[in-house]
Image (cartoon, rainbow, N blue to C red):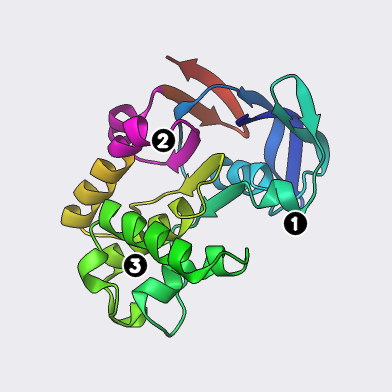
């Protein structure tokens, strides 16, 4: 059964500055949620807390499978993934970069190759599978990061400003990939973007953040 996540009264501060201030919301249905708002409003921090990379100073984040709460452990963390605005890659092939998450899970080579080929094809990089990942453009690197996330088939996929550092062509390609997820993926996708027009294009549920909390939730 798929995961859902509920954040309750989250507070997070950095160096005395409050970034999230009594923020609450439930990501409780399959589909694409898009967080938008000005830089510094707390979007990225909320994604890092929901993906269990950071802990809140106060409040809670809880995961559920149906009505049952899921304990926070390594198994849970492996069901979540966060794609950062700038994707880091290893000095090896595109194929091996995309396969990393499956390899550390102990999958056999044939299964890994099949899953990775499908993911790279989905993001338009299958023809570059044997190329060194360090030679990719910034937009291709971002697409590789999405493939590396998708290949593990996460229950919840978080993407933080997925087109912030790429050109128009790759922005269009990435938006097409994210649109395709609506039919190919039955999980929850949560995207943070400062681009309000992009947010409207991608969202099933549009969430507006201001002053460290989700103030407006538009269907």
Residue corresponding to mark 3: 141
Q: Is residue 217 above or below residue 51?
A: above
Query: In this view of the protein, which residue sits in the foreground, 43 or 212?
Result: 43
Residue corresponding to mark 1: 15
Q: Residue at the location (50% across, 18% down)?
A: 217
Q: Is residue 5 above or below residue 41?
A: above
Residue corresponding to mark 2: 185
Q: Residue at the location (26% across, 57% down)?
A: 121
Left/right of residue 67 with respect to residue 39 in the rendered view: right
Residue 183's spot in the image, x, y percent? 33, 30
The part of the image, by quadrant, that contains residue 104 is bottom right
Identify the element where label 3 is drawn: helix
Q: Which residues are magenta?
A: 179-204
Report the mark closest to the observer, 2 or 1. Answer: 2
Identify the element where label 1 is drawn: loop
The residues tagged by marks 3 and 1 sit, at their Cα atoms, a distance apart of 32 Å
Residue 81's spot in the image, x, y percent? 56, 51
Q: Residue at the location (42% across, 49% down)?
A: 161
Q: Residue at the location (44% across, 67% down)?
A: 110
Q: Is residue 211 above or below residue 215?
A: below
Q: Which image quadrant: the N terminus?
A: top right
Observer able to see residue 166: yes
């Amino acid at each position: 059964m798929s995961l859902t996540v509920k954040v309750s009264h989250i507070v997070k501060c950095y160096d005395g500055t409050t970034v999230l201030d009594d923020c609450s919301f439930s990501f409780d249905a399959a589909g694409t949620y898009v967080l938008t708002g000005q830089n510094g409003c707390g979007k990225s921090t909320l994604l890092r807390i929901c993906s269990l990379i950071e802990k809140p100073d106060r409040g809670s984040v809880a995961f559920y499978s149906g009505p049952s709460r899921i304990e926070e452990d390594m198994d849970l963390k492996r069901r979540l993934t966060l794609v950062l605005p700038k994707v880091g890659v290893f000095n090896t092939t595109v194929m091996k970069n995309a396969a990393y998450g499956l390899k550390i899970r102990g999958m056999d080579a044939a299964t890994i190759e099949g899953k990775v080929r499908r993911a790279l094809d989905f993001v338009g990089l299958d023809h570059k599978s044997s190329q060194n990942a360090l030679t990719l453009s910034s937009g291709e690197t971002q697409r590789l990061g999405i493939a590396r996330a998708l290949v593990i088939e996460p229950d919840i996929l978080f993407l933080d400003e997925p087109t912030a550092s790429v050109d128009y062509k790759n922005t269009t390609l990435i938006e097409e990939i994210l649109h395709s997820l609506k039919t190919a993926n039955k999980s929850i996708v949560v995207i943070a973007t400062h681009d309000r027009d992009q947010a409207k294009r991608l969202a099933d549920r549009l969430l507006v953040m201001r002053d460290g909390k989700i103030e407006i939730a538009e269907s």
